[in-house]
Amino acid sequence: MTTHELEQLLMQQPVSLLHRLARGRISRHFRSGKRKLVDLLLQASAENRPGLESDLAALIEEQSPRHQARPVEPPPKPKAPTRPATSPVSARPHRADDHGHHEPPVSLREWLSGIGIPQAQPFVPDAWQVDALARLADTDVVVSVPTGSGKTYVAIEATKRAMQENRTVIYTSPLKALSNTKFTEFSRLFGPGQVGILTGDRREHAQAPLLIMTTEILRNLLYDAAGGEIDVRLDTLGLVIMDESQYLADPERGVVWEETLIFCPSQARLLLLSASIGNPQDIADWLTAIRPNPCALIRHTKRSVPLRAGYLHPNEKLTPLFRTAGIPYGQPHLLHPEAKRLFAEYVEETGASRSR
Ligand SMILES: Nc1ncnc2c1ncn2[C@@H]1O[C@H](COP(=O)(O)OP(=O)(O)OP(=O)(O)O)[C@@H](O)[C@H]1O
Ligand SMILES: [Mg+2]
């Protein structure tokens, strides 16, 4: 898509959609009119064009009549309902709910559809993965994409590249358990002698070219280096991968991430991975400000694996929690009528509201 085409497409969208697209990309976007908002979005797209285009496509898709009025399975032939309270979701009459929505709620069958083992296909990296790796050649990179998108692929490919250049790679995670899992996974991939682990509980192959450690351990190594006790691994350090980097915002442990980033040697590339940073652009801007190289942001919000929210009543009845199959983006309040009914039934049966 050319910039002109993108501009035309943005101008055709309602302002509410543009504001949703601007979230996390443009600060105080609610103060802008439509024209200004489109200009700001085009400016922001210079940072991460594929991410903006994919988010825009997802929002347009979400607003399309096809998406809103999902086809529902034909209602079963009317039978004399013995217990209307447990009648199938799809058999319930469609009425406007409290929010004035007339579209039919998703049925349980639709909500469960597609779950299973997908057919094996050749691996083709997504555009954002290719983009992240290309950017990493010249800059630090913050990757902010939904869970299950394939952040590990970027980490592995970047590690391979750095190891080919005889550079040390440090992979940090916030949890010992995750460090152990990654140690096993990466040892299988790169060969056991190539991977080391340093946590509070384990110390193995401490001179390996790829070191897995908790962020606290890396912070302490950097402290020692700052105090003059240069660790040989830091001399050759080429890449620092910080998985689950949203811990930067943790009220107690966040300072460890902050200090690690501040003390990280300038010759090493930084790769921050997260599915849940609310303000990734701010983080990228901050890193650009404190480090010699700029920091690129790779961001999109389209889920490769949609999340489904369901409600399991103590009577074992399962129902979608929301009116749609996936978790509705920006509209978490649109509860499924059957879930609402089950909540009400539960409150009535247990007196839950009285006990509050
Ligand atoms: N381009 C791709 N096409 C298809 N599948 C992919 C692609 N990239 C990664 N995957 C697969 O997606 C799954 C999830 O990947 P991964 O564990 O890297 O996700 P993640 O982004 O790290 O998620 P989390 O936020 O939960 O840590 C893996 O099975 C991986 O093999
Ligand atoms: Mg991951």
Image (cartoon, grey):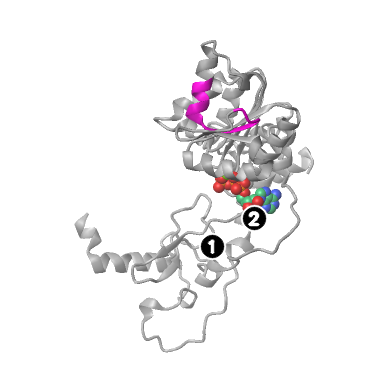
Question: Does the magenta-highlighted stretch encompass residue 335?
Answer: no
Give the quarter of the image for residue 68: bottom right
Q: Residue at 31% of width from left, 69% of height from top? A: 345
Q: Residue furthest top?
A: 228
Q: Amino acid at mark 2?
A: Glu
Indicate the position of residue 215 as horizontal and vertical percent values: 50, 30
Q: Crowdedness of circle 1 by 10 Å Cα count: few (<14), some, many (20+)?
A: many
Q: Residue furthest right?
A: 2
Q: Nearer the viewer, mark 1 or mark 2?
A: 1
Dividing the image into 4 quarters, which one contains the N terminus? Answer: top right
Quarter of the figure with the C terminus? bottom left
- The residues colored magenta run 207-221
Q: Out of 132 and 189, give the one closest to the viewer.
A: 189
314 or 186: nearer the viewer: 186
Q: Ligand 1 closer than 8 Å to the CB at disc 2? A: no
Look at mark 2 in the image and give the residue it sits on.
61
The x and y percentages for residue 149 are 62, 48
Asked whether 237 or 145 is in front, the reply is 237
Q: Residue at x 63, y 42 (%)?
A: 187
Image location (x, y in percent) of residue 100 = 46, 61
Inspect the magenta stretch and tell me whether residue 210 lies in it: yes
| Amino acid on which the number 1 mark rests in the picture | Ala
Residue drawn at (52%, 21%) of the image: 221
Q: Secondary structure at mark 2?
A: helix
Tell me how far mark 1 sits from mark 2, CA to CA: 14 Å
The tag on residue 325 is 1
Q: Is any atom of residue 316 visible in this view?
A: yes
